[in-house]
Image (tube, grey):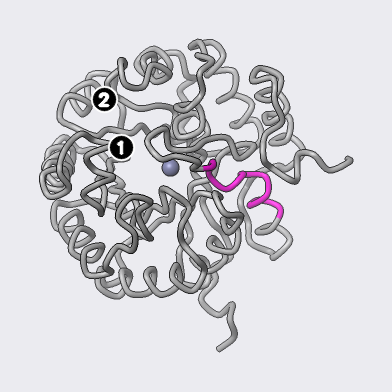
Amino acid sequence: MTPFSGVGKAVTLEEVGLRDGLQGEARLFSVEEKVALARLLMDAGVRKLQIGAFVRPDWVPQMANTEEVFKALPERKDVTYTALVLNETGLERALSAGVTHLYVAASASNAHSLKNLNRPMPEAVKGVARIVDHAKKEGLHVRAGIMVAFGCPFEGPVPVERVLEIAERFADAGADVIDLADTAGLANPKQVYKLVVTVRSELEGGSLSLHLHDTRGLGLANLLAGLQGGVTHFDTSVGGIGGCPFIPHAAGNIPTEDAVLMLEEMGIETGIHLPRLCEATKWLETRLGRVLPAKVSHLPA
Ligand SMILES: [Zn+2]
C-alpha cells in the first residue's frame, strides 16, 4: 500500500463554471455567450458540463435563460449536459427542456438550508429524495449532492452521521451518484479522505463525487485526498470562477486548469487540453473585466 494505491488512472472533471461559477455574477450572460463558452470548453476536451439551473429566476437571474441555453447547445453524443434542480417545479422545467442528467442537492445543515433553499433541512432532504425518485421514474440520470457536508459557516461542524443518513436516503431513492459538497470551502484533506472512505463503504461501492470550493486555498489538497479515497469524479470551474451567493466570502470551485495540470502531471487522464482550456478562461476574463483565481492560466506560455 502506498498513499496512491487507491488512485485511478483517469478522472472525470465536471465543469460547473456555467452554473456555480456564473450564478453569483452580477453581469448577466446571454444565451449566445453561454453557448460560446460551452463550445470553448468542449473544444478543450470537457465532456461533462453543468450548463445551468432550473431555479427561481427572481432569486438567481443569471440562470433565467437555462431553457434557451439547452436548446441552443449543439447535440453531441460524447458530451453530457447537466443542470441543477432544487424542487419539483425545477424538475418539471428540466423535463420539458429535455435534460437527461440532473444534479439535485440539499443541505446537511438547517441554517444553510433555510438561507439557500428557504426550507428547513429535513423538509429539503425529503423533497430532494422525492425529486430523485420522480426523476428516476422518468429515466433520468441523477447525481444527488449534500451541501455543506464538511461544515457549515452558520452552524459549524456537521456530524458524519447526518451526512451518512442523507447519503443513504438519496441512494435509496435511486440516485446514481452521491455528491459530497464542500459548499463553503471548510474541508481539510484528512476530513475529506475520512468522509469519502466512510460514505463509500456505507454505500457499498456506490458512486461518489466531490464538489469542492477553494475558499481557504485547500481545494487541490482536498481533491487529492478525495482521489486517494477512491473518488474519480470532481466538480471544477474554468478559471476558478464562482462562490455560493448565499454564503459570505465563499470562493469559487477549484480552477479546472489547475486540477488538470496537477492530475495530468501525476499521470491521471482528464481528457482536457490545457492551453485550449486557458483560452476559455481568457475569454471569460475579458467579459468579466477581471482576473480569475486560476494559477495555470496566468503562467507565461
Ligand atoms: Zn458550489
Please state the horizontal and vertical placement of residue 290, each as a whole percent of the image: 70, 25
Q: Quadrant of residue 136?
A: top left
The residue tagged 1 is 102
Residue 195, compared with residue 297, is above or below; it is: below
Q: Is residue 28 visible?
A: yes
Horizontal side of residue 102 vs 37, given as left or right: left
Q: Which residue is the extreme one toward the bottom?
A: 1
Tell me the residue at 42%/32% (across/down): 245
Rounded to the nearest whole Å, what is the CA distance between mark 1 and mark 2? 8 Å
Specify whether residue 91 is painted magenta: no
Identity, as a three-letter code, of the amino acid under mark 2:
Ala
Q: Quadrant of residue 157?
A: bottom left
Q: Are marks 1 and 2 in contact (CB under 8 Å)?
A: yes
Tell me the residue at 33%/33% (across/down): 84
Tell me the residue at 21%/64% (across/down): 162
Residue 10: numbered disc: none
Crowd tier of the residue under label 2, counting other residues whose Cα lies within 10 Å: few below 14, some 14–19, many 20 or above:
many
Identity, as a three-letter code, of the amino acid under mark 1:
Leu
In front of the other: 88 or 101: 88
User: Ligand 1 falls in which quarter?
Assistant: top left
Secondary structure, mark 1, is strand
Quadrant for the C terminus in the image = top right
- Give the mark nearer the N terminus: 1 vs 2: 2
Q: Is residue 78 visible?
A: no
The residue tagged 2 is 94
Residue 65, compared with residue 78, is above or below; it is: above
Per the rendered image, the range of residues in magenta is 251-261
